[in-house]
Image (cartoon, rainbow, N blue to C red):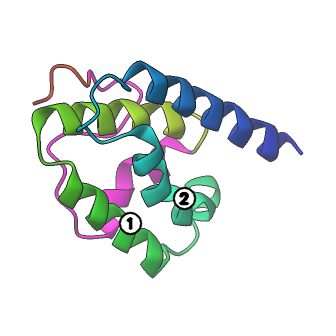
Amino acid sequence: MAGMMMMTKALCIVLTLNMLFAPYAEAITCSEVVSKVVPCLSYLKSGCAVPLAYCSGVKGLNDIAKSTRDRKIACSCLKTAYAYYSPNNVVGLPDKCDVIVSYKISLDTNCSMYV
C-alpha cells in the first residue's frame, strides 16, 4: 500500500512537471521519460536483476533526448521520479545497461547546469 502511494505521488509530480514544460511542444515530455523507465521499477525498489526491457527503455530515452532542452527535461523528470527509490540503484542503472549519460542521476544533480 505504501509503495502504491509513493508511485502515485511520483506520477503526480511527473505530470505536474509535464504541464510546466508543455509550452515546448517539440521537446520531450515527462510522460515519454517515465514510459521509458517504467519497466525497471522492480530494480529501482529492490536492486533485483535489470530487465532487458529496462535497458531498451534507457537506450531509447538516451536516443530521443538529443537536444540540450530534451536532456534538461529528462534530467528533471528522472530526478523527480527517482526521489522515491534507492539512490544506489538509481545511480547505477545507466552503467548496468551500458548507456553513457553525461551527468550523474541523483537528487543533487543541477539539471540546468550539467549540459
Look at label 2 and name its amino acid.
Answer: Val
Residue 56: horizontal and vertical position, in percent? 35, 73
**Based on the displayed image, in which of its 4 quarters is residue 8 positioned?**
top right
Q: Marks 2 and 1, how far apart in space?
A: 8 Å
Q: Residue furthest right?
A: 1
Residue 90: horizontal and vertical position, in percent? 44, 48
**Based on the displayed image, in which of its 4 quarters is residue 23 positioned?**
top left
- Horizontal relation, residue 55 to residue 9: left or right: left
Q: Earlier in the sequence, mark 2 or mark 1?
A: 2
Which residue is pictured at 10% across the width and 30% down the height? 115
Q: Which residues are magenta?
A: 86-110
Q: Which residue is mark 2?
A: 38
- The reply to whether the C-beta atoms of the residues labelled 2 and 1 are less than 8 Å apart is yes
Q: Which residue is mark 1?
A: 57
**Is residue 91 inside the magenta stretch?**
yes
Choose between 71 and 21: the one closer to the eye: 21
**Residue 60, relative to residue 44: is it above or below?**
below
Choose between 55 and 109: the one closer to the eye: 55
Choose between 59 and 21: the one closer to the eye: 21
**Is residue 5 inside the magenta stretch?**
no
Look at label 1 and name its amino acid.
Answer: Gly
